[in-house]
Amino acid sequence: MFNKGRMRLWLIITPILLALTALLPKMADAEGGATQDVHPAVDVYADLFPGEKIPVIVQSDDADLSQWVVERGGDVLHEFDIVGGFQAEIPIEMVEALDLSDRADWISLDAPLMTSRRGGDDVDPSRLATAYQFAANAVPAWEEGVSGDDVTVAVIDTGISPSDDFGGRLAGFGNFSSEEKIPLDSNGHGTWVAGIIAGDDPKGRYVGIAPAADLLSVKVAGRDGSARVSDVIEALQWVVQNKDRYDIGVVNISLNSAIADSYLRDPLSAAVEQAWFQGIVVVVSVGNLGATPFAADHAPANDPFVITVGAFDDQGTGDRSDDVLAGWSSRGVTVDGYAKPEVVAPGVDIVSTSSGNKSFLAQEGPDRLVARGYIQLTGSSASAAVVSGMVALMLEEDPSLTPDEVKFRVIATGTPVPGSDAPAIDASSATFTTIEGSANGEALPNEFIDPETGRIMEDSILWRSILWRSILWRSILWRSILWSR
């Protein structure tokens, strides 16, 4: 079975998997071939660990396929209705048999994830000890009495530890990590992200963008931060199923798959699209790979049906004139022709709630601890959290907004920032604007999603063939005409 020891080996093989991005153009142009339905990272894993079962996610509309796998010696670990497939561990021979049988629509490696952390209306702005709230222009919204009240933000991360900063606003816990008996945050990343979204320091120094919003802790990683794509898919499935129970309006994902791919066939992309089409605004971090080739092609940041957020440096001031893009913030055009990120937000030296001095991040860098109960970290994880908080403000002001309308307003109200093709967010302008429009008007959904219903299609194979013919033309057009650096 895939255990903690094997998870640590992902740290060794991840650079190799990242190198597979060089195959993306060839894969995107493929019309057929014996291995069309298997991601090449599966073969790389088999070569690295000969004789061992391979962790995969199999997508298929064949209801009997999981039983077929079990009968032939494979291990089916979870069924994922949200993406029309299942998580399994199977030998390489079974991968080849599945590919030849045409019973599997797509077989991808259950890849490791990369965190995007690098290495209320009674808020008194004069007491704030941080500048990012000013840089994001959230303060005017607070002054108008908008602070995220009655909006729940689900945080898919390492968990959230209770804190005075969250008061009674922790709505619930879901745990899909290897730490089954530890629902709280032993790493620290998730609590830090949650504080940026909705923290409310009783002393008024460290306050999140939406200090009245409710939070839902959805834990997918343990103390060392290790997680797999299947963990996030399972978490998203739970979020969608519990949308009405917790009144979830936003989900924050400050994680990215270690493998670059087209969003059209990626199972994690299918999962975030399910949430989006069910009315949940999905906010994701773009990652910290700079302008390297295919930096923007890591799910779920590569999907048009999310808000992908990069990072700018506010220089520790609320003055927008000195803001500049963080050089390490991932950016580029995806293999499917989408410019990513869509917006940028503060992400450098962000102080937020700590999960305690014994957390992994606090132990790893005690110099990061600021005052008692707070920690300073950097990365596009923070930037995504800022935007999730901003969306909570928008949904309090106008609960009728759809995800596509939210995304349109977030982008349309942004302002230029040096070094970035994407605009910097303006939280108050986005909250109070009356501009009308809808993002993703011509965007195609993941090949497993029915464009009419927003749910997994019964005949994914037919849709896939239509989708590829459409997307190839558009990808070439966008890459050659609209976007160049």
Image (cartoon, helix red, strand yellow):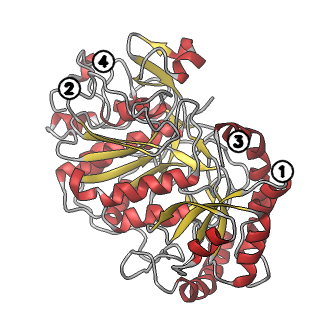
Q: Which residue is mark 1?
A: 48
Q: Position of residue 64 (x, y in %)?
A: 54, 79
Disc 2 to disc 1: CB gap under 8 Å: no
Q: Amino acid at mark 4?
A: Arg
Q: Answer whether residue 342 is visible to the viewer in this image.
A: no
Count neighbours of disc 1 (C-alpha within 10 A) and say few if under 14, some if 14 to 19, many if 20 or more: few
Q: Is residue 322 above or below residue 421?
A: above
Sequence-wise first label, 1 or 4: 1
If the image is split into quadrants, where does the C terminus sit? Answer: bottom right
Residue drawn at 36 percent across, 68 percent down? 277
Residue drawn at 49 percent across, 64 percent down? 79
Q: Say which of marks 3 and 4 sits in front.
A: 3
For residue 172, side relative to residue 283 (left or right): left
Q: Which residue is mark 3?
A: 6
Disc 1 to disc 4: CB gap under 8 Å: no
Q: Position of residue 1 (x, y in %)?
A: 66, 49
Q: Amino acid at mark 3?
A: Arg
Name the residue nearer the viewer: 298 or 338: 298
Q: CA distance from mark 3 to mark 2?
A: 46 Å
Q: CA distance from mark 2 to mark 4?
A: 9 Å
Q: Amino acid at mark 1?
A: Leu
Count neighbours of disc 4 (C-alpha within 10 A) and say few if under 14, some if 14 to 19, many if 20 or more: some
Q: Secondary structure at mark 2?
A: loop
Name the residue nearer the viewer: 310 or 377: 377
Q: Amino acid at mark 2?
A: Val
Q: Which mark is residue 205?
A: 4
Sequence-wise first label, 3 or 1: 3
Residue drawn at 62 percent across, 55 percent down? 296
For residue 88, side relative to residue 29 (left or right): left
Q: Which mark is residue 123?
A: 2
Name the residue nearer the viewer: 49 or 18: 49
